[in-house]
């Protein structure tokens, strides 16, 4: 079984910028780096779709990070509540079966 290669974001950006800037043609880049044309096309599309994020202000990024942290705290709290409910349910079930109900 063949393992998949993993490329760093820096490598992907380098290859795509070489192609977009005209340093290499897409075919030459694919040959040099042993890539399939579909992979290079996907990387180009991803770079173009997310290019606007490079110019986001630090305030926008910090707002996004704060929202992520808030959602992670909420997920943790809900997980804890679920565990408590499961434990209470098992105690309730075992107590009611001992009482013959």
Image (spheres, rainbow, N blue to C red):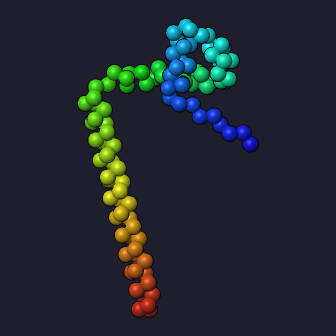
**Residue 61 to residue 82: above or below:** above
Q: Is residue 10 left or right of residue 25?
A: left
**What residue lies at 58% left-to-right and 21% top-to-bottom?**
41
**What residue lies at 66% left-to-right and 18% top-to-bottom?**
32
- Of the 4 image quadrants, the one containing the N terminus is top right
**Residue 92 to residue 38: above or below:** below
- Quarter of the image where one finds residue 31: top right
Residue furthest to the top in view is 22
Residue furthest to the right in view is 1
Tell me residue 54's x, y (percent): 37, 23
Tell me residue 3's x, y (percent): 68, 39
**Residue 91 to residue 77: above or below:** below
Q: Is residue 5 left or right of residue 8?
A: right
**What residue lies at 40% left-to-right and 80% top-to-bottom?**
91
Nearer to me, 2 or 39: 2
**Residue 31 to residue 75: above or below:** above
**What residue lies at 31% left-to-right and 39% top-to-bottom?**
65
Count of numbered circles on the image: 0
Nearer to me, 93 or 31: 31
Residue 45 appears in the rendering = no
- Quarter of the image where one finds residue 37: top right
Nearer to me, 68 or 17: 17
Q: Is residue 61 left or right of residue 50?
A: left
- Of the 4 image quadrants, the one containing the C terminus is bottom left
Tell me residue 64's x, y (percent): 31, 36
Residue 78 appears in the rendering = yes
Tell me residue 83's x, y (percent): 39, 67
Q: Is residue 7 left or right of residue 63?
A: right
């Amino acid at each position: 079984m063949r393992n998949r290669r993993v490329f760093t974001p820096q490598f992907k950006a380098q290859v795509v910028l070489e192609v977009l800037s005209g340093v290499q043609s897409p075919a030459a880049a694919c040959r040099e780096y042993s890539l399939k044309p579909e992979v290079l096309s996907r990387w180009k599309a991803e770079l173009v779709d997310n290019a606007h994020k490079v110019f986001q202000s630090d305030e926008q990024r910090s707002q996004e990070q704060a929202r992520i942290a808030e959602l992670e705290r909420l997920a943790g709290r809900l997980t804890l509540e679920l565990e408590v409910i499961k434990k209470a349910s098992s105690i309730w079930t075992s107590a009611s079966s001992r009482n013959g109900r």
